Image (cartoon, rainbow, N blue to C red):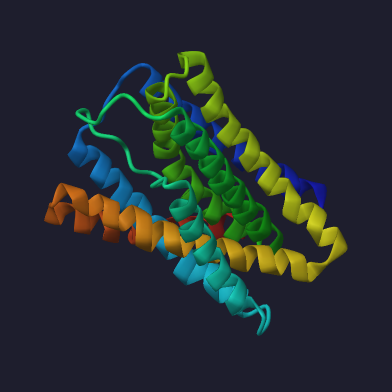
Amino acid sequence: MNLDTLQIALLLGLVTAVGNVLGTYLAVLQYQPSRRFTAGALGFSGGFVLAAALLEMVPESLARGAWMPPFIALGYLLVFLMEQFFNVHLHHVPEENDPSTIPAATGLASLVAFNTHDFIDGLAIGAAMIADTRLGIVVSLAVIFHEVPAGFVIATIMRGAGWSRRAAVLAGVSLGAITLVGIALPFWAGRISLFATDALLALAAGTFIYLGATLLVPLSEAAKSRWITLLVFLGFIVFFLSNWLVSRFLG
């Protein structure tokens, strides 16, 4: 894969890192978005992520061979097991009345879980970019949409576990850094085996299905508003439009 494609992928990775840091600063500065706003953001990003998975990543993976469906399933199960093992619900923004004291072990486990999750996000961007530049860009957009909540949550957890503001910010920065590592890995793996990059794309597709269908969309229902349902559909529509615009831009 040529250097230009890697540079584009890393540039998009930097944008996702900025989203992480932005969310972290919102938490450190003690800005608490309303429950309705948070639910709407989760619903919209859930629709966008689910559209990216079902309409682009899964079909692209299936076209690459009979061995890809097991990797899609593995990707889904990987995030599920990670949540259960670490007892962490990714992208759940704590409410104002949540207890501020969090066990130190929970804070550390959360940091590991979120870094693992963002590493997989990086794999998704890198593998998609190798498969097709257009696909890589739309997958990057899907990642960017949910990185601000991720940064907000990890900083909130770190602060609740007794970490300093500086440490909480560094936790958010670590998410952006690990995303860049994840982006670079498929490019390296592709030099060894094309099957490896295909498998990473399928793995990422499974994680996106879990992220959209099992995490983001159900969490958005906490607001108990029919408008949130429309925002989920809006996420799908924006995905279609962004996909079309990227295709036009790339000729």
* Image quarter (top left, top right, bottom left or bottom right) of the C terminus: bottom right
Question: Can the viewer see residue 243?
Answer: no
Residue 179 position, x and y percent, is: 62, 42
Left or right of 129? Residue 46 is: left
- Apparent side of residue 175 relative to residue 110 in the rendered image (left or right): right
Q: Residue at x 51, y 65 (%)?
A: 77
- Number of numbered discs overlaid on the protein picture: 0
- Residue at the spot x=45%, y=52% of the render? 83
Position of residue 162 measured from the top left corner of the image (x, y, whole percent):
42, 19
Whether residue 23 sits left or right of residue 125 in the image: it is left
Residue that sits furthest to the left in the current view: 225
Q: 169 or 127, which lies in front?
A: 169
Q: As drawn, which residue projects farthest toward the bottom?
A: 66
Check the picture and name the quadrant holding the N terminus.
Answer: bottom right
Q: Residue at x 34, y 43 (%)?
A: 92
Q: Is residue 56 left or right of residue 63?
A: left
Compared with 176, 131 (above or below) is below
From the viewer's side, name the closer residue of 234 and 114: 114
Report whether residue 155 is seen: yes
Q: Quadrant of residue 238?
A: bottom left
Residue at 18% in and 41% down: 36
Residue 47 % position (x, y): 35, 58
| Residue situated in front as seen by the camera: 110 or 7 | 110
The relative height of residue 7 versus residue 55 in the rendered view (above or below) is above
Give the x, y percent position of residue 94.
Answer: 29, 35
Q: Residue furthest right?
A: 192
